[in-house]
Image (cartoon, grey):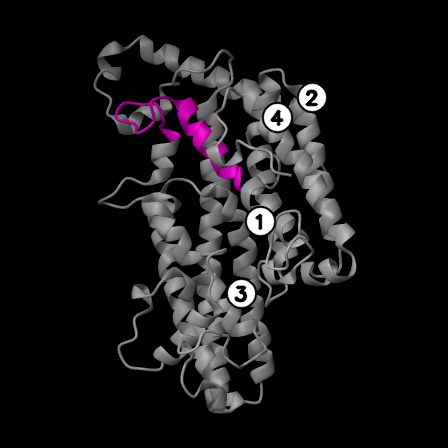
Amino acid sequence: MVKPFSSKLEKLVVNIVVTLVIMSLVACDESSSSTQGTQFSQAITVPSQPSNNFNQTLLLQNLTDNVIVPTYTKFAQLAIAQETAIGDYCNALTSQAIDTDAKNASAKKSWRDVMDIWQIAEVMQIGPLLRNNSTLRNKIYSWPNTSDCALDQDVVLAEQEGYDISTRTDSRKGLDAIEYLLFNQNLDHSCTVFGTDPQGWNNRTNKDRTVARCGLAKIAATELVYNGQELLTAWNGNETIEGYADILKNAGQVDSIFNNVHDAVNTVSDAIFYIETFTKDAKLATPLGVFANDCGLTPCAKNVESRFAYYSLKNTISNIQGLNMIFTGGETDAGIGFEDYLLDVGATDTATQMRKNLTDVIEFAMTLQQSLTELLAQDPEQVQQVHDQLKKVTDSMKADFIQSLALELPATSAGDND
């Protein structure tokens, strides 16, 4: 059930009043406030705001503590479960166990579970995931940078002593790699350029090739656990580094990397525009043929994300659900999100319309029973409808949303291509 706007605004007003009371108490004791370190400033200081009374620090605190970090935490937990499930499957293959099919199904389910949460995280690429040209993000999930042939080559290399996946390129690891290794039913290699194919691969038995692919999948799953933990540490911090969660929540304070809290809010806003550049354009418009693809300007399954697992439509839904969490303030709609910011500045129509459009596209996409590959071949009009409904969301984001909140539009979203 959608919670009425008024209850969220009432909560926001209470939070602001409490903050102002705390500030007034601190002002009465200048000697104590002047000795506070930056680690204590969050509780007593409200950074400068735009020309309205909305507390952007509370927005950042809620999104950090109740949306972003919990999403990353769940991803790290599911990555561990996936490593176990794939390990069990590989062991069953080599031990000639009778429950191989069940172990295979469990391994595939574990991948879907991890992918579901990661696709939510895709619209939360902030701070650590963007550092060094998105190095950590690409190690976890490199799409659209993928290479089936490179994976076939590494399946053979991984059988040799000394193989180190951490030194391999992004297209040979992560969730993309695990999908190919677990779901691709064609056991022949995918290399088409002479001299790049793994020698003798197609002459090996089906069982031998299945075991080899599982071996690399297990290695990739283990590295994914490590990368998930690295992401959590980067956000939560430890005894040697300050976590990005505190950096974001303390934006605009002394020694902050952000000049003011509004700049930090703009960083979160930039992240959710993934929904336009990747979800709407790359995941829907390109396979549809709105943009040129591998088939020209016609529906093309070759350009579908997660084409081996037939999971692209679910990925798209998860992206939109992630955006909805940022917009409404969380899964339960109880926290402070961008919707509250819009309401506070008087952009009620924009807030109402964006909520409706997000709900409409999620609900419609979830009614579709076929995969994106099947829909492109049999009923592309349904995919077009998902695209068109999502475009209503992104059009609002690029115009009324940005203007109402005085945010800057990411360079990647400056045009209007479709």
Q: Secondary structure at mark 1?
A: helix
Q: Which residue is mark 2?
A: 349
Q: Are marks 2 and 4 in contact (CB under 8 Å)?
A: no
Q: Is residue 367 visible?
A: no
| Above or below 96: residue 386 | above
Q: Secondary structure at mark 4?
A: helix
Find residue 12 and report its image quarter.
Answer: top right
| Alpha carbon separation for disc pair 3 and 1 | 22 Å
> What residue span does the magenta drawing correspond to?
249-274
| Magenta highlight on residue 263 | yes
- Foreground mark, 3 or 1, reads 1
Q: Are marks 3 and 2 in contact (CB under 8 Å)?
A: no
Q: Which residue is mark 4?
A: 8
Q: Tell me the kind of residue under disc 1.
A: Ala
- Foreground mark, 3 or 4, reads 3
Q: Which residue is mark 1?
A: 282
What quarter of the picture does the N terminus occupy?
top right
Residue 107 appears at what percent x and percent y? Answer: 54, 72
Q: Is residue 27 visible?
A: yes
| Above or below 175: residue 184 | below
Q: Which residue lies at the image location 36% right of the left edge and 55% below the top edge?
A: 229
Horizontal side, residue 374 vs residue 77: left or right: right
